[in-house]
């Protein structure tokens, strides 16, 4: 079986040597290892899909034999690897989801709500977190005045949804959507939209999907629309009532159905109480 030279793992995920290479890569390049593992999973997923389709169509009894089935299986694996190299979007979705989990955890000190300027970042704060907070902090403060929710809670949610800005929703041509909260474009939305791959959870299981998301001209517009969403939808009433408490905010969003991920509240709380946000906000 030939292997694409661009694949640093050197084979399918079922190959133990490939898994060892991913483990070794994780020690020096965690982000690269995440992408490699996601591509390998995508290849296996495509292979399973092709096998399912093959089983559905049945076999020609005249040519059916153990040898032809083996050859067909090997050929399907090759096709799966080629398709995965080109990508169907699943690997990108998984890589973004896994990347969001790499932020370190630790208790956080809440910043003041009133300040309109970005807080000074501690020297040891991760560069990605510092830059992300600096870009969006004034808009989070403006949204806090509208909703009563502490700005660092909304910054944490934006970090969760966008992977600290690394996985911001983009259009097919790479156009920025400035959509940091994963707000979808439903029937009531008449503004610009972008289509992007995402992960939806159905009965607790992740499923890849293509969804339409709202697109904004700036982060200021994104935060203003997010504030309007929370204030205009009755299902978010508990979020606003309990929004000054981190657990009340996170669990209120989850209970209101903001996201389908059953671990959404826990993930959001880890970022709110995490060292990456704390050190980016520390003066």
Image (tube, rainbow, N blue to C red):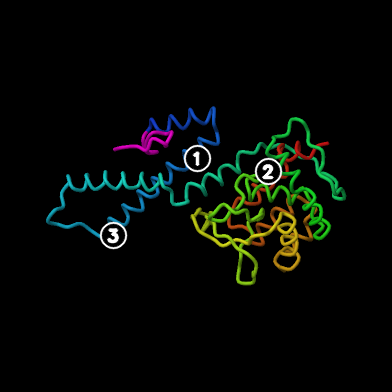
Q: Position of residue 26 (x, y in %)?
A: 52, 31
In the image, taking residue 57 as reference, residue 83 lies left or right, namely: right
Q: Earlier in the sequence, mark 1 or mark 3?
A: 1
Residue depicted at 50% across the width and 54% down the height:
205
Residue depicted at 72% across the width and 54% down the height:
219
**Which dot marks residue 56?**
3
Q: Position of residue 83 (x, y in %)?
A: 37, 48
Assess disc 1: are there few (<14), some (14-19) or many (≥20) residues with their C-alpha within 10 Å of its C-alpha.
many
Q: Earlier in the sequence, mark 1 or mark 2?
A: 1
Q: Disc 1 on helix, strand or loop?
A: helix
| Mark 2 → mark 3, Cα distance in angstroms | 44 Å
**Which dot marks residue 270?**
2
Q: Which residues are magenta?
A: 1-15
Between marks 1 and 2 in the image, the one whose residue lies nearer the viewer: 1
Disc 1 designates what residue? 35
Most prominent secondary structure in the magenta stretch?
Answer: loop
Q: Position of residue 95 (x, y in %)?
A: 53, 44
């Amino acid at each position: 079986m030939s292997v694409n030279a661009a694949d640093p793992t050197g084979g399918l995920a079922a190959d133990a040597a490939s898994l060892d290479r991913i483990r070794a890569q994780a020690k020096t390049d965690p982000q690269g290892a995440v992408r490699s593992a996601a591509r390998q999973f995508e290849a296996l997923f495509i292979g399973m899909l092709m096998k399912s389709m093959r089983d559905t169509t049945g076999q020609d009894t005249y040519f059916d034999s153990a040898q032809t089935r083996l050859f067909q299986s090997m050929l399907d694996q090759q096709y799966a690897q080629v398709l995965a190299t080109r990508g169907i979007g699943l690997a990108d979705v998984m890589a973004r989801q896994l990347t969001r989990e790499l932020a370190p955890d630790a208790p956080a000190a809440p910043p003041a709500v009133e300040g309109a300027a970005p807080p000074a970042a501690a020297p040891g704060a991760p560069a990605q977190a510092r830059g992300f907070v600096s870009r969006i902090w004034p808009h989070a403060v403006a949204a806090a005045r509208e909703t009563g929710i502490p700005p660092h809670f909304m910054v944490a949610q934006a970090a969760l949804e966008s992977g600290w800005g690394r996985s911001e929703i983009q259009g097919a041509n790479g156009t920025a959507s400035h959509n940091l909260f994963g707000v979808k474009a439903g029937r009531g939305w008449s503004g610009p939209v972008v289509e992007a791959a995402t992960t939806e959870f159905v009965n607790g299981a992740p499923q890849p999907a293509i969804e339409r998301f709202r697109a904004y001209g700036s982060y200021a517009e994104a935060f203003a629309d997010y504030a309007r969403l929370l204030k205009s939808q009755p299902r978010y009433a508990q979020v606003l009532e309990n929004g000054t408490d981190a657990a009340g905010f996170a669990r209120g969003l989850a209970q209101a159905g903001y996201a389908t991920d059953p671990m959404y509240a826990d993930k959001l709380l880890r970022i709110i109480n995490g060292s990456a946000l704390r050190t980016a906000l520390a003066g």
